[in-house]
Amino acid sequence: MKNKKITVTSPLLPDLEEFIPCLKQIWDSKWITNNGDFHQQLEQALCEYLGIDYISVFTNGTLPLITAFQALNIRQGEVITTPYSFVATTHAIWWNGLTPVFVDVDPITGNIDPDKIETAITENTVAIMPVHVYGNPCDTAKIDALAKNYNLKVIYDAAHAFGVKVKAPSNSPAGGGRALYKTANPMTYEWLKKHSKEMRKNQTQAEDVLWSLLRGENAGASFRRQHVIMDYIVDFVCVDKGLVLEVDGGYHTNSEQKEADELRDQMLKKQDYTVLRFTNEQVIGDPDTILKQIQNTLQSLPKRVSKDEAWSSILNAGDMSTLSFHATKVFNTIEGGALICHSAEMKQQIDYLKNFGFEDEVTVMAPGINSKMDEIRAAYGLLNLRQVDRAIAHRKQVAQNYRAGLKNIKGITCMHEIEGVLHNYSYFPIFVNEREYGMSRDALYEKMKAANVLGRRYFYPLISTFSPYSSLPSSNIANLPIANNLANAVICLPMHAELTDEDVKRVIEAISR
Ligand SMILES: Cc1ncc(COP(=O)(O)O)c(C=O)c1O
């Protein structure tokens, strides 16, 4: 259709054919909410995908913001935050009886300006709530250092920052402590993990012999037993070098099994693993020769650079971060959200708080709320997680096309793409300079609408201008000139995984004409 409506966003939907069997499973089990299987699987899969250790999924992205203060026991005082965000950020502060203090933003990133945070700190300041606006990472190193200096908590509103990573050395606080390789398939991982535990308990005689040769870095490197890689459980693996060892019983000589083994080896090879296969007899009969062969192979293999060493999730910064899985977001569970923290104890507290504060059947630890994600949305989320990389890659292409198409239009500026960041392309904001463009932002917004191209003035108006907050001293426009300029100039262009080249052309034309 030539003039079809181009919407600002369009939800990423899982394949209905794949969703229906999940629904059937939920129907059969009759377990539809309260920390069911899909809920647990989604949390596990999100930890794997995002490169974080602890996540609690919620019914939306606002309740984790509210709950974060509860979990950190922040009951009164001032919270330094940004006016250039969605109103939920400030509402979360208000709902906790805390006082928001607005600070101006950086003109390049739209994020809270860390240099202005320090001047806003008073003896009443208890926390900082920055936002990774449009998925652009805040200066977390500066903000977290400031917080440490003044003994403040930091809760990042990362609603826009699903999957965003920054380059970080593996020994930095953000990069350290992660599992090296995360190659398991989130859909099958839980089941395989249980199975692998059993297999470790019931090793064959040959596996026993080989394990006695490998354990304690006897072979010169560390090995794991019965380890899950993709959809497989391998007998032994040295993750650092990507060396897999398989000890084959007699049945591996039959032709069907041989074929399956070959396929498996090929799949592992694709993931950059080297596979050595030994028979039971070889291992038991001549362990010294086997050990020598393993040592020689290890020596010939370079150390692999893990993805997580190169990139660290932005969600590892601060005390906590929150995500929104709303239908408009890069990754959605229709409505949904999450709270990310950095210890098992804290996750436990959060899980109590999202279930009315129940610690067990008869104990309530605090006035919690009900914000549990149900099984249907958790299953939907698991399926969407499989296609989110493809969606982000498409968004990246759209962003590149927008940049190329808009670069010569006077008075229109695109946001810089920050280097050293794995972006998620969640939004594509442009800023209109009325004098140079010859038309106001609002006039352009209306003109686009008339051409059936729907943008969004996001974030406009500034939160500090809304009636609950406008009388705060920090809401004075003189305190927030940069945020005010951005809010009055911004239009977010259509950005989603279904935009075609033709759509992008039409958006650019609507702005060019
Ligand atoms: C920056 C920011 N914070 C919080 C939220 C609230 O998330 P939810 O709509 O999932 O409650 C949003 C939603 O758009 C947002 O953009």
Image (cartoon, helix red, strand yellow):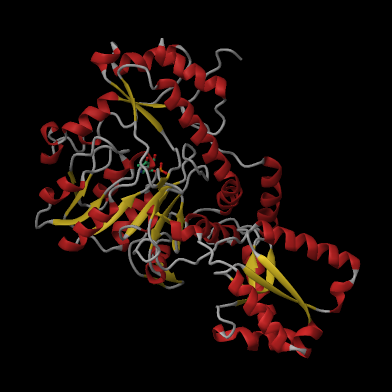
Camera-side residue of 151 and 468: 151
Camera-side residue of 356 and 498: 498
Residue farthest right in this picture: 255
Say which quarter of the image contains residue 362.
bottom left
Q: Provide residue 224's location: percent of width, then percent of height.
A: 60, 76
Above or below 472: residue 154: below
Camera-side residue of 240 and 226: 240
Q: Can the viewer see residue 216 in this picture?
A: yes
Report the side of 443 relative to 334 (left or right).
Answer: left
Q: Provide residue 60's location: percent of width, then percent of height.
A: 43, 47
Residue drawn at x 46%, y 31% is 399
Say which quarter of the image contains residue 463.
top left
Camera-side residue of 67 and 122: 122
Of the 4 image quadrants, the one containing the N terminus is top right
Q: Can the viewer see residue 202 in this picture?
A: no
Report the side of 49 relative to 251 (left or right).
Answer: left
Say which quarter of the image contains residue 438.
top left
Rendering quadrant holding ligand 1: top left
Q: Provide residue 504's location: percent of width, then percent of height.
A: 50, 22
**Number of numbered discs:** 0
Q: Provide residue 11's location: percent of width, then percent of height.
A: 53, 35
Above or below 114: residue 210: below
Of the 4 image quadrants, the one containing the C terminus is top left
Residue drawn at x 55%, y 83% is 217
